[in-house]
Image (tube, rainbow, N blue to C red):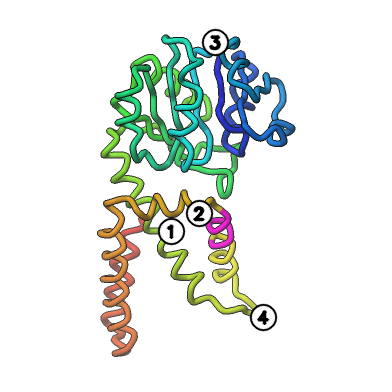
Amino acid sequence: MRILILGAGKMGSFFTDILSFQHETAVFDINPQQLRFVYNTYRFTTLEEIKDFEPELVINAVTVKYTIEAFKKILPVLPPNCILSDIASVKNGLKKFYTESGFRYVSSHPMFGPTFASLSNLSNESAIIISESDHLGKVFFKDLYSSLKLNIFEYTFDGHDETVAYSLSIPFVSTFVFAAVMKHQEAPGTTFKKHMAIAKGLLSEDDYLLQEILFNPRTPSQVENIRTELKKLLAIITEKDAEGMKRYLTKIRENIK
């Protein structure tokens, strides 16, 4: 299959690496400097090159802020039978775009990123495939993700957004709060250092990505849950309620089993 990958960043390079030995791949990036780090693939910087390549599948791996813009840039040079795909963690506007584009599509979300995941061992990681997607597109990504030993789940666009609001917004907000009250420690403990590593990794992500995940319409209710639990915990601590603390610890240990 001829596969065009948009964006030669971390995830674009990752998909190029895993696909280029079994498929004819090309990477398109408007920044030629980015293309220095991709190998065993065609490297494109012009729309004419894409037109000549005639891709059968496009994998959009650009920064989430520019996902739809990148699609619109290349649509005029794509063959009509090409399947569009994205791996965006934020699907805002994508369902409407796909419907209006006239192209078949498959949307998925690898629930891992190069910041924390070990890309050489993904057996504990997951991927979501959007159920409204084209059948052949879903088959392709199911085969691909299965080969990476990912745990695969199928959700609607709405179901995906709900999952992201829970699984990403809660740790994101918790990490932001940690960073907001953090003070430099001369002799940090192990737990502190682990939280610090998470905070540095998360805050190295693109600002727009963090913003869009937190601006998910379902995020405020999750943040409200955090505030409610903090209020309960603060009351227990303030009152030095030993029995209350015991019950609270028992409850939260059940949550993480």
- Looking at marks 4 and 3 on the same chain, the residue that comes earlier in the sequence is marked by 3
Contact between labelled residues 1 and 3, with CB atoms less than 8 Å apart: no
Q: CA distance from mark 2 to mark 1?
A: 12 Å
Say the numbered circle drawn on residue 54: 3
Q: Which residue is nearer to you in this view: 251 or 220?
A: 220
Q: Main secondary structure of the magenta part?
A: helix
- In the picture of the structure, the residue carrying the numbered disc 4 is 186
Marked residue nearer the N-terminal end (2 or 4): 4
Assign a secondary structure to mark 3.
loop
Query: Which residue is disc 2 drawn over?
Result: 207
Can residue 20 be seen? yes
Residues under labels 1 and 4: Cα distance? 26 Å
Magenta-tinted stretch: 199-204
Say which amino acid is labelled 1. Phe
Front of the two marks 2 and 4: 2
Whether residue 189 is situated above or below residue 55 in the rendered picture? below
Instruction: Determine which residue is flagged by label 1.
Output: 172
